[in-house]
Image: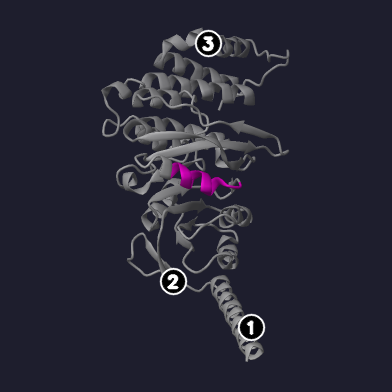
Amino acid sequence: MFDHAETMAREDRVSRCQNLEKHLIQTLRHVLSGAGHNEPGSGGDVRFNGELSHMKLSVVIPTYNYGRFLHHCLESVAGQMADDTEIIVVDDGSTDDTSHRLQSLSGLLPAGRLRHFYQQNAGPAAARNHGVRQARGDFIWFLDADDCLNEGALDCMRQAIMAHPQADLIFAGYRSVGEKGRIVEHPAGSLAVNRTRNLKNYLLQRLPGLTIGSAVIRKAVLQGIVFPEGVHSNEDVVFFGHLLATCRAVSVPGQVVDKVRHPNSLRNDLARIEESGLQAVERLFDPEFLDVQQMRLRSLYLGCYCMNLFRTYYLQGYTAKARGFYRQALGAYPLLIFNWGYASKFLRSLFGIHKRGLKLKNIQR
């Protein structure tokens, strides 16, 4: 009797283990096959694998003819996602194979966790705003299509959100990756208590880590603060400037994203920078978002921005155009004349002498 009872107990344990194994296999297959769904109109609550889950983070990625970069970007996010995270890709009227690549990449995640939308080409600002309207998360994380999240980045920001429950803007640092693989680290920088001081430090590039890809923003504040559509250069400066001027911000240590620098990126399009960069200054200094004290920073920022344009055109050899921006910078903020680095370049450009003794092009443009 004892042997028979022991045998029955052993068989019962084996049976239960087999049933548990079958259940785990079925669950795994269910997840990997994309089962689970999200109900329209459910807000931030999403059904995943039959259970109601609250969406904490929405990663918004605009793309325009960057299909070849998307796989690397999406893999860097998908590899560390939890049930409270979704990815939204907004195709800004691409003419390459972006749509086909998105279809093939949709199997990376369960259904509803990677969503993509198409719009007629309207620029990255409009694409990001579109992504915010579609997002279900409490916080928005903007990435560029050629960005790559560093390992542990999602956990880092998730912990920062829990540690700073009142914060509207949380940002870390980032790494820039050059064409030849050269990596430069950009730390977040320290914030002051005074918002005007933070805005000034940001405009003077003293918060080097604050950029697209290094920050999460509470979605609720994005009902009033949006990317300025129609501005194709420095639109992120307008956006983050308004956030720093009006919202509760926190910086955290570490680098959470790698940003690739390559020649065909918008950042390196001189014509576009000149065309819309000065327009961004006007959109930034809007009394609807900035108080009287913050508005007084306009002359300083305009002067510094024109000095950057002076330096850019000087290094490209367009000395006549460069000198025009130098004079414009001094007109906006005369104290910049005491910056010897810029002043020496201006004097060398007058005589067509490069710092290494080479003649510069004096091209009118």
Across and down, in percent, residue 361 comes to 66, 21
State yes or no: discs 1 and 2 in contact (Cβ < 8 Å): no
Asked if disc 3 and disc 1 are in contact, CB closer than 8 Å, the reply is no
Question: Which residue is tagged 1?
Answer: 10
Q: Amino acid at mark 3?
A: Asn
Q: Amino acid at mark 2?
A: His
Q: Is residue 231 magenta?
A: no
Q: Which residue is mark 3?
A: 339
Q: Look at the picture and state if 80 lies above or below 263.
A: below
Quadrant holding the N terminus? bottom right
Q: Which mark lies nearer to you, 2 or 3?
A: 2
> Quarter-wise, where is residue 322 in the image?
top right
Identify the residue at horizontal 46%, vertical 61% (top origin): 118
Can you tell which quarter of the image residue 109 is in?
A: bottom right
Measuring from the top left, give residue 209's x and y in whole percent. 52, 33
Secondary structure beneath dot 3 equals loop
* Closer to the camera in the image, 318 or 169: 169
Q: Which residues are magenta?
A: 151-161
Residue 3 or residue 297, whichever sits in front: 3
156 within the magenta span: yes
At 37% from the left edge and 36% from the top edge, which residue is drawn? 243
Question: Of marks 2 and 3, which one's residue comes earlier in the chain?
Answer: 2
Q: CA distance from mark 1 to mark 2?
A: 40 Å
Q: Nearer the viewer, residue 310 or 18?
A: 18
Q: Which residue is mark 2?
A: 37
Q: Would you say 203 lies left or right of 147 here? A: left
Decide which of tag 1 and tag 2 comes sooner along the chain.
1
Q: Is residue 258 above or below residue 8?
A: above
Q: Is residue 32 above or below residue 298?
A: below
Q: Quadrant of the C terminus?
A: top right
What amino acid does circle 1 point to?
Answer: Arg
